[in-house]
């Protein structure tokens, strides 16, 4: 146990608040989407923001993140939340000096978000629009979103994160769409298939096929994730030469 210094006076240090902000990513209509709430009160009333809020004095950071996500959107993603950064630049919050701890979660099926009493709305919006300025975000949430997406881009290459976006059974086209959306690239379908099927530990045929599409044709084969995803990914991110 560390003894309290008798001369220590908390009043000598500037007070600040701690918040949590949560980036929830999912795939919708072949695009990478994030979960946002529309602020119902100042500051930034009417603007879109990441779910989050102030940490209570008796809460851990993880508990605060779980509570805020559930209260503001109705989404229960506690198991999947991971810390990835902290932000405390002066002036990031006009109310007071605020340090926020950021979390990210990849959720395959969010359902219909439900806004809380202090939020005007909750919705899934395309990440590309938010990062290109098509959607104005409150506070420094564009920076936080950008950092979260970059973290997931790295995880996609090093871990089995790609399968976290997908249902239990999926087509190779759905798997390819995850990589294309997160990395903002396009893969040749035949080459992608060859990479994924080079080792039978990545995906395993289920013997079933997807529902027929509107254009007809033979339905795509369904797969499930194999044992190799715990070791990384069969696909590597393209690097642009500097």
Image (tube, rainbow, N blue to C red):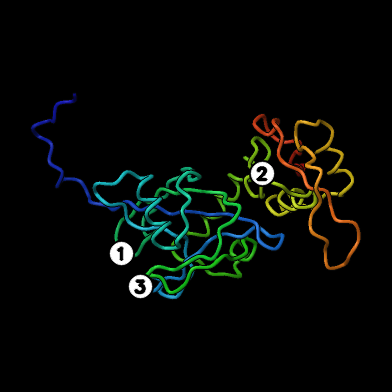
Left or right, 108 with reference to 44: right
Single out the mark in the foreground, 1 or 2: 2
Residue 242 visible: no
Side of 30 relative to 20 (left or right): right
**What residue is shown at x 44% (from left), y 60% (from top)?**
51
Question: Pointers 2 and 3 in contact (CB under 8 A)?
Answer: no
- Which residue is label 2 attached to? 163
**Numbered disc in front, either 1 or 3:** 3
Q: Where does the N terminus fall, quadrant-wise?
A: top left
Element type at mark 3: loop
**Crowd class of label 3 (few under 14; some 14 to 19; many from 20; radius 10 Å):** few
Q: Which residue is mark 1?
A: 95
Q: Position of residue 183 (x, y in %)?
A: 70, 50
Vertical relation: 91 (above or below) 171: below
Q: In x, y percent, where is residue 231? A: 67, 29
Real-space CA distance between mark 1 and mark 3, rounded to the nearest whole angstrom:
9 Å
Q: Residue 114 appears at what percent x and percent y?
A: 46, 67
Give the quadrant of the C terminus: top right
Badge 2 marks a residue whose secondary structure is helix
Up the image or down, 2 lies above or below 75; here it is above
Which class describes the residues within 10 Å of circle 2: few (<14), some (14-19), or many (20+)? many
The mark that comes first in sequence, 2 or 3, is: 3
SS at mark 1 in the image: loop
Q: Residue furthest front?
A: 207
Please tell me which of labels 1 and 2 falls first in the chain: 1
Relative to residue 34, is residue 231 drawn left or right? right
- In percent of width and height, residue 89 lies at 40, 52
183 on left or right of 14: right
Disc on res. 42: 3
Query: How many numbered marks have been drawn onto this rendered protein structure?
Result: 3
């Amino acid at each position: 146990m560390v003894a309290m210094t008798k001369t220590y006076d908390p009043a000598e240090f500037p007070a600040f608040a701690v918040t949590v902000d949560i980036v929830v990513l999912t795939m919708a209509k072949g695009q990478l989407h994030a979960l946002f709430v529309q602020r119902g009160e100042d500051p930034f009333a009417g603007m879109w923001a990441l779910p989050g809020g102030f940490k209570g004095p008796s809460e851990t950071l993880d508990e605060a993140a779980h509570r805020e996500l559930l209260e503001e959107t109705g989404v229960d993603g506690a198991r999947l939340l991971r810390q990835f950064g902290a932000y405390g630049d002066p002036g990031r919050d006009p109310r007071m000096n605020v340090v926020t701890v950021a979390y990210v979660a990849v959720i395959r099926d969010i359902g219909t978000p439900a806004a809380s009493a202090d939020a005007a709305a909750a919705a899934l919006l395309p990440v590309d629009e938010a990062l290109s300025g098509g959607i104005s975000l409150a506070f420094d949430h564009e920076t936080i979103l950008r950092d979260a997406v970059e973290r997931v881009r790295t995880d996609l290459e090093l871990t089995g994160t790609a399968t976290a976006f997908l249902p239990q059974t999926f087509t190779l086209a759905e798997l390819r769409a995850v990589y294309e959306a997160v990395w903002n690239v396009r893969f040749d379908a035949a080459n992608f298939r060859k990479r994924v099927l080079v080792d039978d530990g990545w995906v395993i045929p289920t013997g079933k096929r997807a529902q027929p599409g509107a254009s007809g044709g033979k339905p795509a084969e369904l797969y499930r994730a194999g044992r190799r995803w715990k070791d990384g990914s069969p696909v590597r991110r393209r690097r642009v030469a500097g």
